[in-house]
Image: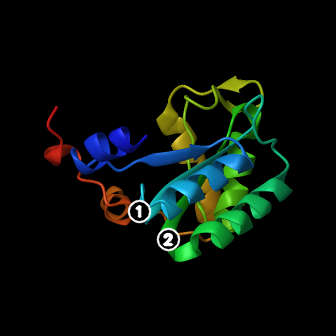
Amino acid sequence: MKRVVRELGEGCGTRFEYECYDLGHLYNLAYLLDEQLVEPPLFLQTVFGILGGMGTDVELLSYVRATADRLFGRENYEWSSLGAGRHQMRIATVAALLGGNVRVGLEDSLYLRKGVLATSSAEQVKKIRGILEELSFEIATPDEVRTRLRLKGAGQVAI
């Protein structure tokens, strides 16, 4: 772990996304933070609806958020959630209501709504954007997201 963090993180300027499929993953991440193997702000992605991981009960989102606040301090992480499959839009909407960011796309669900296959991830993004705008949320621009997550941007990547 130390080698990965040092070589890919510090050595290459990589910002890690910490995907947490289970509540225990938050505690593992807190350990890495305590050991100073990682540093804030963390980019925390909580995943709901994957077999063997957290279920899709909306109460879990509140509990996960409260646990992350207690372990890391709200100012020390950016939080995003995703719901797999048919739970995608509901989990994303509740996460936004709890002050988090959202993630949608074909990687997590093939559907736009019940019985309707999405034609692209962009179609799913448009749908969640519409839901969030109807709830009076402001949508971040790509540049605002890069700044918040401390990303380099495509022009700074040596591939």
Taking the spot 14% from the left edge, 37% from the top edge, the residue there is: 158
Do we see residue 119 in this rendering? Answer: yes
Disc 2 target residue: 76
For this rendering, which residue is in front, 132 or 23? 23
Residue 37: x %, y % from top left: 42, 55
Asked if 13 appears above or below 110 in the picture, the reply is below
Residue type at mark 1 is: Glu
Taking the spot 71% from the left edge, 31% from the top edge, the residue there is: 85
For this rendering, which residue is in front, 79 or 138? 79
- Determine whether, in the image, residue 46 is placed left or right of residue 17: right
Taking the spot 71% from the left edge, 48% from the top edge, the residue there is: 24
Do we see residue 129 in this rendering? Answer: no
- Determine whether, in the image, residue 64 is placed left or right of residue 3: right
Which comes before the other along the chain, label 2 or label 1? 1
Taking the spot 50% from the left edge, 34% from the top edge, the residue there is: 121
Disc 1 target residue: 39
Residue 95: x %, y % from top left: 67, 59
Q: What is the quadrant of residue 1 in the picture?
A: top left
Q: Whole-Å distance between the Cαs marked 2 and 1?
A: 9 Å
For this rendering, which residue is in front, 134 or 97? 97
Pointer 2 local density, CA inside 10 Å: few below 14, some 14–19, many at least 20: some
Q: Coloured how?
A: rainbow
Residue type at mark 2 is: Asn
Q: Nearer the viewer, mark 2 or mark 1?
A: 1
Residue 47: x %, y % from top left: 66, 43
